Image: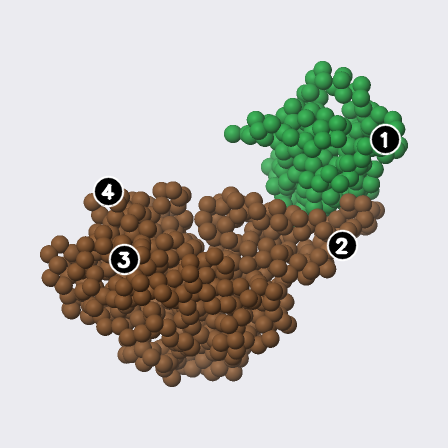
Amino acid sequence: MTSSQEATNHPEKPRIATVSLAGCFGCHMSILDIDERILALAEIVDFARSPINDYKTFDGRCTVGIIEGGCCNEENVHVLEDFRKNCDVLVSLGDCAINGGIPAMRNNIPLRECLEEAYLKSPGVYNPSGTIPNDEELPLLLNRVYPCNEVVKIDHFIPGCPPPADAIFEVLSALLAGRTPAIAYGDLKYD
Amino acid sequence: MKQALATVVQEICKKYDFDKQRMMDIVLGVQGRFGCISVEAMDLIAEMVGSHRVEVESVVTFYSFLSLKPQGKVVIRLCDDIVDWMKGYDAVADAMSKALGITMGETTSDGAITLTKTPCIGMSDQAPAALVNDVVVTNLSPERAQDLIHNLRRHLDPQQLVTTVGDGNHSHPLIRSMVRNNIRRRGPVHFADFEAGQALKATLAMDPEAVIATIRASRLRGRGGAGFATGLKWELCRNTPSDRRYVLCNADEGEPGTFKDRVLLTECAAQVFEGMTIAGYAIGADTGIVYLRGEYAYLRPYLEQVLEERRANGLLGRQIQGHPSFHFDIRIQMGAGAYVCGEETALISSCEGHRGDPKNRPPFPPQCGYLDRPTIVNNVESFSAAARIMLKGAPWFEAIGSERTTGTKLLSVSGDCRKPGVYEVPFGISAREVLELAEADNPGAVLIGGPCRQMLGPDRFSGRICYDDLATGGAFIIFNRARNKLAIAERYLDFFIDESCGHCTPCRVGLQLLKNLVHKVVTGAGEPSDLAEMRRLSNIIIQTSRCGLGQAAPNPVLGALENFSALYTDLVSERSPGLLSTFDLSRAVVDAELRVGRQSKYV
């Protein structure tokens, strides 16, 4: 982890942005699991671009960007790079962001086979035209799923599937207080 | 056919008393007869020795010289160690591939010849070298490689490739090898005259305790490289209560660039066996095992004969030299191409008939080793030295060497020098003196102790070879100033990745991550933070791997970072805001673009 980019010179409240890329939103559920502490958090920070408030674009620089999920398509990459450009500190939240997670199970299978299995060959598929969806609006899939730290530099990692709310709260509190996060052993131990 | 297989497997298992602890011998025997150990053969072995197929398979798949699938009648294993690479491996490999019409790892369509590569075979002083079945061929050039293939095609008999024999015992009818000893400097401990039985006679005139006291007084330390006090090891073993104890000789000389044990076993086998016998008397053991690396199989018939002679002369067997209660014999256990088996607990696992997995320490082998009994594992050179100490006395030995490291050391010198070979030098000699003795060619770096240690630059050439300064198991590899040190570090890292047993995640996965980082830096895509990450990752691997392999594996990279740091720092540069140059979206979407017939809007 590097803390080189941790900035404290924000005149207004620090702003937090969050996003779910190739994830299941479970990590965002875990953010909400900080329960009533979210009220204390809301006192000291503003939420910028985030599914929590449904803002879809950046309207200014943010202190902390929280990323759930890895990158499975071109849009994920674009959004992640946008986060990197607009946030002082980026945090990979959860196993998909850190390692690719469940979506990365396709990584050893060629893309073509994955698509054919999903849309043509899988039991129960009804697809009389035999086409694989290809709308302009659909982002192109990447050849494999990439963990976020293989696409942009990530400053902090919170492991877990999902990470415990206490771990998330600790990292956010520490970053806002300008100290290095220290996740308790119990919040890192999963067996 | 099936019946024939069963009969032969039965015969081989019977030879080893259906003892599953002799699994290595059994599977080697089966492969010797059928060229591989098939699934059917594994089933039969498991059934006959009372084991399970998965246990047999775990052994067969672990060792690189064992094969599940049929290989060629002749298997050529071309050594791809770094010294061979410096001496023209690529051209030799090309010549062999072309002459055979196959690529590395393949077998000719008639099933006659398999071509593959293997790490250091202990011939760095006469590289490039290869094993053709058990026969060693040395000093290969593309032309000689072509001739070799041509001749082999004709007779398929590796032994016929030996047209000239090397010096010393290489002309012995049981060795007949083209290997040369290249003994460049003979010292008083190993290469002085030795009359079999004399050191043992002096030993048997003493109590075992007095023998241990003598070895302790000599301050002999383990010659494998770790430098544990030999006398103390023997004493710990003797003092551990047990019904049986064992003496193991580590002749699994796999550290790249090391070949001095090869020379000791060729020229001083009696002295080594005598040292083992002395150890047996000292600790109260009746069995000794020499774990001989598979690459040195060509020495086995000769070594068996030396053992036989010693039995005939009352130097092995029951009531040795008329001593009423001292019985001791030695057997040779063949390895099958696994570097990690040079680690003493992995060596024990292999002797017990398992995969060569290292064990947890403590307990240490002197407390609980082979078959859970107190065991000493010493290097070939340590036993040879022990025999000389019993002959000449501790004060004589202690007077040689530096103040804190006594005796002599056998160095295996190779690489960019005029006189590669074995040098017996007193401890305390400086690296520079060795470079001069070997007539090194414009040396820019030297790797003392092999890739498990750090490569040193000219500013460290004044360092002294001893346990307090430059510790070594014997390798002394010289690189001239033109050599690419980062490429060398990367190749050695590849070696450790290949040889990791896979048990500890930091070693199995961490080394691959380290390689990715090194590759990123070497290809010019690195940032300063990557160098810090290389150090951090290396330290994790060192601290959390349980055996010496993982604990040493990051050293080539760390050494390059510490001693040649400018080479790395020149390659890295700070990138614009946090975007990684290693990720290329246009390459990542190319499959999808082809599939759907439209371009990415983000590229």
The residue to which callout 1 is attached is A10
Q: Quadrant of residue B331?
A: bottom left
**Mark number for residue B214?**
3
The residue to which callout 4 is attached is B241
Q: Name the chain under label 4.
A: B
Return the x and y of residue B312 as percentages of the image width and height.
Answer: 15, 68
Spatial separation of the CA atoms under disc 4 and disc 1:
71 Å
Q: Nearer the viewer, mark 4 or mark 3?
A: 3
Spatial separation of the CA atoms under disc 4 and disc 3:
22 Å
The residue to which callout 2 is attached is B573
Q: Of callouts 2 and 4, which one flags the residue occurring earlier in the amino acid sequence? A: 4
Circles 2 and 3 in contact, beta carbons < 8 Å: no
Q: Name the chain under label 3.
A: B
Who's green, chain-wise?
Answer: A
Spatial separation of the CA atoms under disc 3 and disc 1:
74 Å
Up-down: is A51 above or below B554? above
Q: Nearer the viewer, mark 2 or mark 3?
A: 3
Q: Name the chain under label 2.
A: B
Q: Name the amino acid type tagged 4.
A: Pro
Residue A101 visible? The answer is: yes
Q: Quadrant of residue B91?
A: bottom right
